Amino acid sequence: MSDKREGLFARADEVLALFRQGAEFTHELLRENERLRREVAAHQDAQLAASDDRQWEKLRRELLTRIQSLEGEKEDALERLRAVEAENRHFAERYLEIEEENNNLASLYVASYQLHSTLDLSEVLQIIVEIVINLIGAEVFAIYVLDEKTHALSAVAAEGRDVREFPVFELGVGPVGRAVDTGETACAEDLRSDDRHRPIVVIPLRVQEQPIGAIAIQKLLQQKESFTALDHELFTLLAGHAATAIFAARLYSQSERKRNTIQGFIDLLTK
């Protein structure tokens, strides 16, 4: 009986040992499962962090691309703005030039009307002097008239110097004589000259290719630094109007002298 009991106790010990081993194995499995879950969670967190980093990097690149695009658009807009501003300045400058041209042409029209409203040679010369001062901006100049018999060009009116200080030129000789002979306006490169024999501008005065005289400019006003395209147009217009006015005034003066001579001769005959 006691042997049977001892056998039962031994069997029970074996079962308990197996149970303890199973419990330990279960605990070990639970610990390993917990460890694996922590590793999986950490791996998932790392994946999420990496995904967030990739999303942020992608967003950063998109923002940089958009910023660069906006910078390019801003530069294009600024370039267009500068072009518009430059064009506006050009239009404003051109408007002022046109306004100045219109004012000068209006002044020339008035002066031309005055030129042709009198046949008195001294008045004609004085009007020409005022035109050259106000429209061209000359300070020192002389008006030359050609003597058809001697072919000498002598100053008959002047500004800035006494008329007697200006030299006499022969037709075709010297800057004044050559300009009158060819009918071409002569302009020197240097706009300041103290040589009375070499004016900076010579405007020939001709009527139907017939030489009448010239306007010889020696010095410009201090505020005038150069000649513009409008000045050259004024040279041409002034040459025609001044030449016609001088020619008409001289012709009228000669006819008046002849008329007075004939009238005097008639008066002597009828006495």
Image: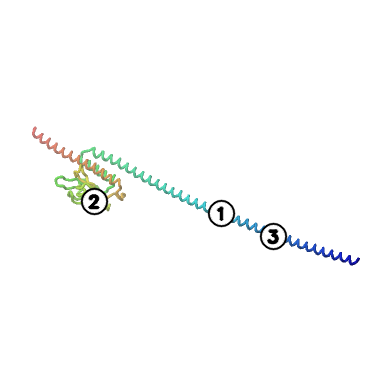
Label 1, label 3: how far apart the Cα atoms are: 32 Å
The quadrant of the rendering that contains the C terminus is: top left
Q: Residues within 10 Å of mark 3 (few under 14, many from 20)?
A: few
Say the numbered circle drawn on residue 141.
none
Q: CA distance from mark 2 to mark 1?
A: 78 Å
Specify which label sits upstream in the sequence, 2 or 1.
Answer: 1
Task: Report the residue marked by disc 3.
Answer: 36
Q: Nearer the viewer, mark 3 or mark 2?
A: 3
**Label 3 vs 2, first from the N-terminus:** 3
Amino acid type, residue under disc 2 in the picture: Pro
Spot occupied by residue 132 in the image (x, y as percentages of width and height): 26, 45
Q: Residue furthest right?
A: 1
Residue 233 or 9: which is nearer the viewer? 9
Task: Give the vertical position of 178 relative to 13 (above or below).
Answer: above
Most foreground residue, 68 or 141: 68
Instruction: Check residue 199 in the rendering and tell me which mark sits there, or answer none.
Output: 2
The answer to whether residue 29 of the structure is visible from this angle is yes
Q: Position of residue 219 (x, y in %)?
A: 26, 50
Q: Amino acid at mark 3?
A: Leu
Q: Quadrant of the N terminus?
A: bottom right
Question: On the image, numbered disc 1 is attached to which residue?
Answer: 58
